[in-house]
Image (cartoon, rainbow, N blue to C red):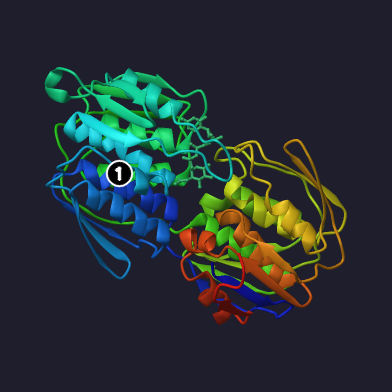
Amino acid sequence: MESLRIWGKHPLSGHVTISGAKNSALALMAGALLCPQQCRLNNVPNLVDIRRMSQVLKALGVGISQQGNSIEIDASNLTTSKAPYELVSQLRASFFVIGPLLARLGVARVPLPGGCAIGARPVDLHVRGLQALGAQVRIEHGIVYADVQGRGGKLRGAKMYLDYPSVGATETLMMAATLAEGESVIENAAQEPEVADLANFCRAMGAKIRGAGTNTITIVGVPSLHTTDYSIIPDRIEVGTFLIAGAITGSEISLAPVIPDHIGPVIAKLQEMGPEVIQEDLNRLRVIPKPLRATDIETLPYPGFPTDMQAQFMALMTLSEGNGVITETVFENRMRHVAELVRMGADIRIKGQNAIIKGVPMLSGAPVMATDLRASAALVLAGLAAEGETLVKGLHHLDRGYEKLEQKLLELGAKMERVAPVDS
Ligand code: UD1
């Protein structure tokens, strides 16, 4: 397991180029299965998760070719409805292929994605929605078997209400409904920008979708989709992570391309804590560091504060003046970075789903273990601000979701190096 050695307290400066959104790219790769012609996705980040998704698609008989940040996906010969367990178990987003597979083939066999470090993450909302669309679904031996009987294997439009605005369930059901007979409505849908990006991609292939990005999405099924060439939105979580890199190291950094609307709550909370965020032009932001004061944060579905920024804000709050509370409402086990931040000198107590953070004057470098993707980013941020040397172990989490993070930080002036496995 590789580690990242960081020498803290080096000021950063300059500009960082933001990559395409990982979560959009994963959903759009699944969406490309809906199309019986080759599609091209641009601005795809080069990440372990994307390579895993490519493997899942290849196992379904799909042709994939990659040049730089573009991927061509040819699902004209979608031959098998069975996604392999070894691959799906490594990447929850690969479960989302169940929607397009059912829509195209009338049958899908997809293993349950299983639990993960941040919580149980069930798929009941996906399953109930697919049943409402006319699929028969049974779960046996950890595999979800879904079939459409009769109607030539076609799903039929339906009204669906999600008990919770799940991103993945909204995406699965929206994709499934694009080729169904008649109209579908998803109520209490997730409103995340990645859902809207997937809808725009599907629309570019000829799907009829309205309301994506709001809590009610209407899809009118069409007989088939056609090829397109589509560019993925910038990664709002990467933007937020670099804004905090500036704030925590007392450095001015500019970032582009950014869609500022996508990170409203992140900017609002950062400004509440002191730092200024200036919009320099349509798609460029600059963070101006200021003394940090504590605030309270509660994670919520979009447009609330994103759970994927919770750990990074916690790192920032450890060095703020005063006490703040961070409440995690989206995932039940997403505070495992607390013990690691405490190892670096942070003063944090957990009570249920709340973390109470008392600002300290300084963090001190220490060996720490990354427990999930965003936790690893938080530890890197803490390491940049800490006195002395921090060794972040478990780097494979970071490689899953941040394109060239360490290279981008080095270009900004950070001092760090990747080191070969030390101990486990
Ligand atoms: C997506 C993102 C992830 C982000 C999360 C919340 C991708 C690839 N990943 O994950 O980075 O942290 O949204 O913004 O896009 N739930 C159920 N039943 C279901 C589905 C979900 O109970 O059928 C629960 C989950 O356990 C969780 C909550 O709903 O507590 C939110 O999950 P969801 O929005 O589905 O997240 P993902 O799509 O898995």
Cβ at disc 1 under 8 Å from ligand 1: no
Measured from the top left, where is residue 323 in percent x and y?
86, 50
Give the position of the C terminus as an image quadrant.
bottom right
Kindly identify the residue that appears in the image at 62 percent across and 69 percent down.
423
Residue found farthest to the front: 423
Q: Nearer the viewer, residue 228 or 417?
A: 417
Seen in the image, is 392 located left or right of residue 194? right
What amino acid is at disc 1? Pro
Measured from the top left, where is residue 132 in percent x and y?
33, 18
Seen in the image, is 389 located left or right of residue 229? right
292, above or below 143, in the image: below
Give the position of the N terminus as an image quadrant.
bottom right
Is any part of residue 271 visible from this angle? no
Seen in the image, is 377 located left or right of residue 208? right
**Which residue position is annotated with label 1?**
84
Kindly identify the residue that appears in the image at 32 percent across and 48 percent down.
28
